[in-house]
Image (cartoon, rainbow, N blue to C red):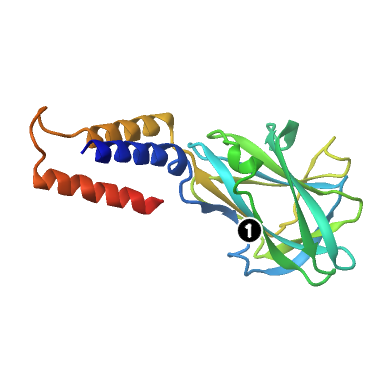
Amino acid sequence: MKQNRFSIIMLWFFLSFFIMPYGYASIVIDNTNNGTNAFIGSKNFTNSTFVAKLFTTPTTRLHLTDMLLGLSSSGSAGAFTLNAKLYVTDGSHLPTGSALVSVSKSFSLGASGTGAYYDWSLVGGAFDAYHLLASTQYALVFSTSTSTAAKWLAATPTTYTAYQGFSFNGSAQSTDSGSTWGTLSNSGAFELSSSPIPEPSAFFLFGIGGLVLAWIRKAPGSKSTGSENWILGRVYKRLYRVR
């Protein structure tokens, strides 16, 4: 029984600190219909012409896990390094201040006129580690690493749909490396996914529950019943399956 209790405690803490923080990811903003909507136009972006997607988070904390973008080269097919940065926004929903987090990824984009959807996983990187605040306005700002333009293809229908308590606040563009911003009507194909962050109270209750369950026993000196051993055995097996 002591060995069982120790193993259950260790497994419960493993769940509390390594499994619970990563809830199920879900789409929160989308105009791609899971990457099936057609393209009807484009907007170039470079290392000095930035494009931003603006949104407000729901009443819970979360982290971003994945993006889907409709892209192509502005000329011949080739490799492009794209940059994504997160900013808070001002009262007009435009990026302001310094970037909160930044990531880059290389994509092999098709030639102009041969656009496709490209998945950008954020799991395990800086975005995954950054916790977005509840009920806060943010901007995702996109650029390339060179002056060679990439095309952000517009999707049809052009309407963005927000889910899970998110609000979509439109798009913005800067032609001077982010010094000034203006609104943008282009509906660049964009899908964003996020995952919730459990509150500290959830960790506390989960941990207490594990300790109580692991230390259920009769008075000192008495033997455990068969049913007690069976219950603890079943819990142990169920927890082990998570691994």
Q: Is residue 90 left or right of residue 211?
A: right
Q: Residue 117: which quarter of the image?
A: bottom right
Other-residue count near label 1 (Cα within 10 Å), few / some / many at <14 / 14–19 / ≥20: few
What residue occupies the far right of the structure in this picture? 147
Can residue 161 be seen here?
no
Residue at the image point whose x is 54% and y is 45% from the top: 166
Q: Secondary structure at mark 1?
A: loop
Can residue 197 be seen here?
yes
Residue at the image point whose x is 83% and y is 38% from the top: 178
Q: Is residue 196 left or right of residue 75?
A: left
Quadrant including the N terminus: top left
In terms of depth relative to the viewer, which is nearer, 192 or 79? 79
Whole-percent x and y of residue 53?
A: 69, 47
Q: Residue 79: which quarter of the image?
A: bottom right
Residue at the image point whose x is 34% and y is 33% from the top: 207
Residue at the image point whose x is 28% and y is 32% from the top: 211
Q: Is residue 181 above or below residue 72?
A: above
In terms of depth relative to the viewer, which is nearer, 201 or 223? 223
Q: Is residue 33 left or right of residue 201?
A: right
Q: Amino acid at mark 1?
A: Thr
Residue at mark 1: 159
Whole-percent x and y of residue 20?
A: 43, 42
Q: Is residue 36 left or right of residue 22?
A: right
In terms of depth relative to the viewer, which is nearer, 179 or 157? 179
Whole-percent x and y of residue 120?
A: 67, 55
